[in-house]
Amino acid sequence: MTGTLLGVWAHPDDETFLSSGLILAAHERGDRVVLVTATRGERGTDDPGTWPPERLGRLRERELESALAVLGVDEHRFLGHGDGTCHEAAEPLAARAVATVIEDVRPDTIVTFGPDGVTGHADHRAVGRWATRARNTVAPEVELLRAVLAPGFTRRFAAVNARFGVFMDDPAEEVVDPGLHLRLEGARLDRKIEAMLAQDSQTRRLVEGVGLAAFRSWWAEEAFLVDRPAAARAA
């Protein structure tokens, strides 16, 4: 029996960094995958003079299309929020928009950010709250996966994380035993890296900074806290 995976993310590239392996595994089972992105990531640059928001937003939209093609995803929607403003949105209305997607897509599993937003980004945290609230309101029977860093990530990659400013505030707390921990290798890891490289505006400086081999190791694991459906919790 096939199912449907719905990913709810803040920026183009969130889905690729945090859930490529999950997406590929879903496709291998024959599942449907639908992704939702709150913003176009139009402020995700250290060089706004060269890349003003409108221009960068168009580029990142194209990069996302290329990355999703690598991952085999052909169903995607933008929510239309401004990059860096998600935490300012009226949460009931933002959650209602996500709930509308859930009601339309009817997923078996939803994947999004946990409370810390993985990196601490305010947009990540907000979108994670929206998706969780929407699921709890209109689809409590649906499994919820909340992305966290893989066990040992902050310790093993402390130097490179600090160098590239991965965390917006203090590093996320270690999750010793997530409910789902994927270790990617071989063809799956190759496809994840290909999808990440397709989002060149966000990954080039990282790859150039550490080298491709280290970059592969850096992002070769994915982890998720598993929030089971309400019925399963009650059983």
Image (cartoon, rainbow, N blue to C red):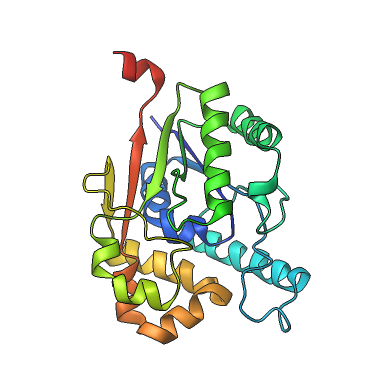
Residue sitting at x 55%, y 71%: 199
Identify the residue shown where x is 36% and y is 83%: 210
Query: Please, is residue 26 above or below residue 67 in the view?
Result: above
In the image, residue 192 lies at what x, y percent?
A: 40, 64
Which of the 4 quarters of the picture holds residue 164? bottom left
Q: Is residue 208 left or right of residue 156?
A: right
Give residue 58's position: percent from left, percent from top.
72, 68
Q: Quadrant of residue 114?
A: top left
229 horizontally vs 86: left or right: left
Residue 88 or residue 70, whichever sits in front = 88
Quarter of the image where the N terminus is located: top left
Q: Residue at x 44, y 40 (%)?
A: 31
Q: Residue furthest front?
A: 170
Q: Pick whichever, 100 or 116, lies toward us.
A: 116
Q: Position of residue 51 (x, y in %)?
A: 71, 78
For the image, the number of numbered tags is 0
Is residue 71 left or right of 150 when viewed as pictured? right
Q: Nearer the viewer, residue 234 or 26?
A: 234
Q: Would residue 162 be visible to someone looking at this image?
A: yes
